[in-house]
Amino acid sequence: MGSLGAGTAIQASYFVAAALFILGLKRMSSPVTARSGIVWAGVGMVVATLITFLTPGMGNYGLMTAAIAVGGIAAWVTGRRVAMTDMPQMIALYNGMGGGAAGAIAAVELLAGEVHGFTVLTLGVLGGLIGAVSFTGSLIAFAKLQGLVKRSFRFRGQNVVNLLILAGAAVAGAVIVVQSGGTQGHVVLLFALALLLGITMTLPIGGADMPVVISLYNALTGLAVAFEGFVLNNAAMIIAGTVVGSAGTLLTQLMAKAMNRSLANVLFSGFGETAAGGAAGPAGTLKAIETPDAAVMMGFSEKVIIVPGYGMAVAQAQHKVWELVQALTARGVAVKFAIHPVAGRMPGHMNVLLAEAGVPYDLIYDEAEINSEFETADVALIIGANDVVNPVARTDKSSPIYGMPILNADKAKNVIVIKRGQGAGFSGIENALFYLDHTRMLYGDGQAKAAELVQAVKAL
Ligand code: NAP
């Protein structure tokens, strides 16, 4: 193939890859087509990767193949093994690699003096800065969620220090642009400060906010990749980066809104740290219930609304919960699921688990759709959810979750809560719902209790 032919083939393949990314993303917007969407986007990535080999002057094919093999095998093995509950930190890690790759491209090109022209230089420097921040920031996010870094490091004037580091990186970047490439010293300084900034920005942020931060870094990685696409004149990178950047931005906004937080508040307030302090406990007592009584309560109900949360994911109880729904439905009970937008540890966490168990989508309602229905429900069954049903979010202005929209489970005629003990939710605060007169605690592991309930309902 001549170089003109190869050039056209490469551009055409990038177009196909980009179309696959966009169509894949579109398919991910519905649970029915989401799995195939991931496959489509994956095929797009394979096309974009393979076509790179045709690019003239790519250099060392052996090294390229080795790098792809190492990355591909590591991702395949870890992706297959990761538990659903560990998914956020895995996303953080992979996302960090994307940011690091974009940063590395910028560093190599800038050090080699290969980036020319004011606009492309600006984009290259910005992409490098953002990519490097996203790289170390995502690694810290991973380490925190994995429990490798247990505390958040906060000190007075922290935001000022971060601002100074950012200003230093910005000055180094500006010199590189103005001096048409700058010196190698400027480039090294830019990247050293950017890598440092990712660390110092993320260390003070509490665990409760980490998923939002990961989503933000995901958006930044996309942006960095798109910017470096201009440096390499690579259409696939520009399009894929833009798609990731905008999807990540929307997701970040959605999560922050569902938690009633502003992005600035997430980044600069240290929410997860102060949350555990808490005020005096709620009024009332915790009242336990045994499985047979809970089964009678639900089995003779007209309407039951199930609220799953992070604990259902930990217990992997979704299959048993679906069996319970079937047993109740067979008795003529109307059962619906109420899903809070930030139930679990990532957006769509509960939907994915319920879909895996085979729960039909028409039984699943989001907060806005179902919240007014709790008043007509005989039982709200809470399984492993905590913060997303905590009424203090409505009433207690001093609470760290005040203002967060919650599911109105407390408005149901009866509330049954399955959880193992007195464990707090992610925000670390007590839940007033558990102490209400019409609430009963069914203590135990989510899966074990759901299985017992299935038997007990069937035996009624
Ligand atoms: P949660 O508030 O974290 O509470 C989970 C509850 O599950 C705990 O109280 C725990 O109590 C119980 N549990 C744990 N393991 C269990 C098991 N094996 N069986 C039964 N129960 C078990 O969960 P949530 O109501 O789903 O709320 C999610 C939280 O994460 C919110 O604060 C949200 O803001 C935050 N968050 C979510 C996202 C997202 O995208 N989804 C993003 C950022 C932050 P025991 O220990 O007593 O069992």
Image (spheres, helix red, strand yellow):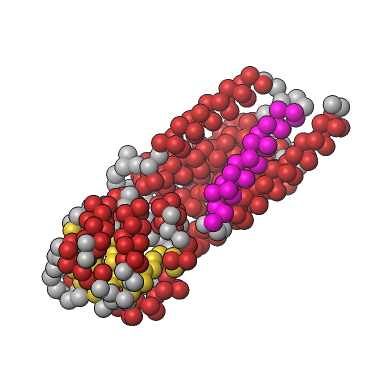
- Residue at the image point whose x is 29% and y is 44% from the top: 150
**Which residue is nearer to you in this view: 141 or 198?**
141
Q: Residue at x 75, y 39 (%)?
A: 13
| Residue 363 left/right relative to 69 | left
Q: Is residue 195 magenta?
A: no
Position of the N terminus by quadrant:
top right
Q: Which residues are magenta?
A: 32-55
**Residue 182 at x, y = what percent?**
66, 36
> Do we see residue 206 in this rendering?
no
Residue at the (14%, 68%) spot, across then down: 287
Depth check, front residue: 77 or 381: 381
| Residue at 54% from the left image edge and 56% from the top image edge | 32
Q: Nearer the viewer, residue 345 or 449?
A: 449
Horizontal relation, residue 112 to residue 84: left or right: right
Q: Is residue 52 magenta?
A: yes
- Left or right of 181, for residue 211: left
Residue 294 x/y as whole percent: 20, 66
Residue 334 vs residue 226, the one in the foreground: 334
Tell me if residue 304 comes above or below residue 100 in the rendering: below
The image quadrant that residue 344 belongs to is bottom left
Compared to residue 290, the image places residue 357 above or below, namely above
**Is residue 117 something that shows in the picture?**
yes
Query: Which quadrant holds residue 6?
Result: top right
Quadrant (top left/top right/bottom left/bottom right) for the C terminus: bottom left
- Residue 430 appears at what percent x and percent y? 22, 64
Secondary structure mostly seen in the magenta stretch: helix
Q: How many marks?
A: 0
Image quadrant where residue 12 sits? top right
